[in-house]
């Protein structure tokens, strides 16, 4: 007897977490699995950040913090946005949450209601449409294939807007594709949005510092839409702090206040010690961020070069994040023994069980012809993973 709510029954489980769990199960059986399914840096949190957390414990930062986070952390974020992005905010326009994931969800829950449409360019991060569904809204996807570098055009955006459109969720650099919108491309989208004042832009910039084209460009830089852009960011990816769970929003005060009201009822403020660690991340040396970025760039070059040699893979060159999103529908319809590959999920499962490499099928990201590989792992793992993938695919006829 299913007594779960309609809300929960309409929700899909996270495909990325599911693949990660399956690969861990195989590992537990003693099978050597290379895990390219998880979206987290393989580096450790930099020392000065860990020291700040230890000091916070000794200094008894062990009580509830204000719901939007400590003023010191919010002021550090204000400074970061000013210095790195040239954007002016006040501490009252910042709210910190338990990771950028909660930050996105807070904004969606605060803005979206029954019948509201939210535009989501596809490929998208798996959780965006699910969050919109949770809020009783309708996700409207705009497909952008590999031939347009997985980026939507202003004309596509214009065509998707209706009187019911409440928000646009834009992720740059992108998970799962690694595509990065240039200033010119963002200006084109901003010009369309300027004509539709009812639309709020949720700009997910969590991969801001993992980019290989120089400077990150934020859609919040355009004055004509600045007052309805909500930036979402956090410490997870840039500072290798995924488990610390600190994300933030920066945006119009009316939206931030709404998110604080919501968060005050269901989680309260994020972890006190993690906040002090995040403050150190933003105010301390940024050298480790650049070191990690360089390592990711080297790995990007390596995996692109190797993946381009895989027969039947169509590969673009990601400009940010740490994902490769090859088009692999060449293999759909092929089989090995009694195993038939009908879609990307079948292919991902085949690569896991036969090649012992964990990837994620693209359907969960709105791109059923692709698979996602994370290259947040060692050069040796990347080389061995692609070798195994090649061997496993060669068996498909």
Image (cartoon, helix red, strand yellow):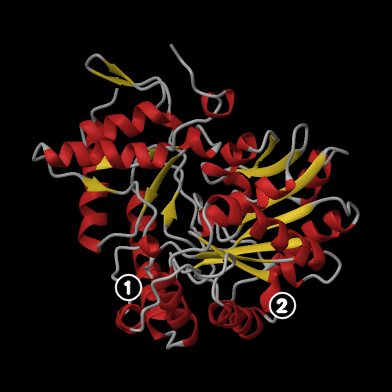
Q: Which residue is mark 1?
A: 45
Front position in the image: 344 or 20 = 20
> Circle 2 is placed at which residue position?
89
Q: Which mark is residue 314?
A: none
Q: Is residue 307 above or below residue 360?
A: below
Residue 94 seen anywhere in this rendered image of the structure? yes
Choose mark 1 or mark 2, whichever is in front: 2
Which residue is situated farthest in the top direction here? 1
- Tell me where residue 252 appears, x and y as whole percent: 76, 66
Q: Is residue 362 left or right of residue 19?
A: right
Vertical placement of 335 versus 132: above or below? above
The structure residue drawn at horizontal position 40% and vertical position 77%, both measured from the top left corner, is 61
Mark 1 / mark 2, whichever is N-terminal: 1
Q: Are marks 1 and 2 in contact (CB under 8 Å)?
A: no
For the residues marked 1 and 2, what is the alpha-carbon distance in whole angstroms? 27 Å
Please state the horizontal and vertical placement of residue 141, each as a whole percent of the image: 67, 37
- Relative to 390, does residue 303 appear above or below in the rendering? below
Q: Residue at image x 39%, y 37%? A: 312
């Amino acid at each position: 007897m299913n007594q779960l709510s309609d809300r929960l029954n309409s929700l899909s489980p996270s495909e990325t977490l599911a693949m990660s769990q399956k690969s861990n199960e195989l590992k537990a059986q003693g099978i050597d699995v290379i895990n390219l399914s998880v979206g987290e840096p393989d580096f450790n949190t930099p020392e000065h950040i860990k020291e700040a957390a230890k000091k916070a414990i000794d200094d008894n930062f062990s009580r509830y913090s204000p719901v939007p986070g400590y003023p010191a952390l919010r002021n550090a974020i204000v400074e970061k946005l000013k210095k790195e992005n040239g954007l002016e905010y006040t501490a009252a326009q910042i709210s910190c949450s338990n990771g950028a994931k909660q930050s996105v969800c807070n904004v969606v829950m605060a803005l979206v209601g029954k019948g509201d449409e939210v535009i989501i360019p596809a490929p998208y991060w798996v959780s965006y449409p699910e969050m919109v569904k949770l809020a009783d809204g309708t996700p409207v996807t705009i497909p952008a294939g590999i031939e347009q570098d997985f980026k939507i055009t202003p004309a596509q955006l214009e065509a998707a807007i209706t009187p019911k459109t409440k928000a646009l969720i834009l992720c740059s650099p992108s998970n799962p594709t690694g595509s990065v919108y240039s200033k010119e491309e963002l200006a084109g989208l901003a010009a369309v949005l300027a004509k539709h004042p009812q639309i709020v832009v949720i700009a997910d910039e969590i991969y801001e510092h993992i980019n290989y084209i120089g400077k990150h460009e934020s859609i919040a830089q355009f004055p004509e839409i600045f007052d309805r852009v909500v930036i979402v960011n956090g410490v997870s990816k840039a500072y290798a702090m995924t488990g610390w769970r600190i994300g933030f929003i920066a945006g119009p005060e009316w939206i931030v206040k709404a998110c604080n009201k919501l968060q005050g009822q269901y989680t309260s403020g994020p972890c006190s010690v993690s906040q002090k660690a995040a403050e150190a991340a933003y105010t301390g040396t940024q050298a480790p961020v650049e070191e990690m970025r360089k390592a990711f760039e080297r790995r990007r070059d390596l995996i692109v070069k190797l993946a381009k040699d895989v027969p039947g893979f169509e590969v673009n060159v990601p400009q940010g994040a740490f994902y490769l999103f090859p088009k692999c529908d060449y293999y759909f319809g092929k089989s090995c023994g009694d195993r038939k590959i009908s879609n990307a999920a079948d292919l991902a499962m085949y690569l896991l069980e036969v090649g012992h490499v964990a990837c994620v099928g693209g359907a969960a990201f709105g791109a059923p012809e692709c698979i996602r590989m994370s290259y947040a792992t060692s050069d040796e793992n990347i080389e061995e993973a692609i070798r195994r993938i090649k061997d496993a695919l060669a068996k498909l006829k």
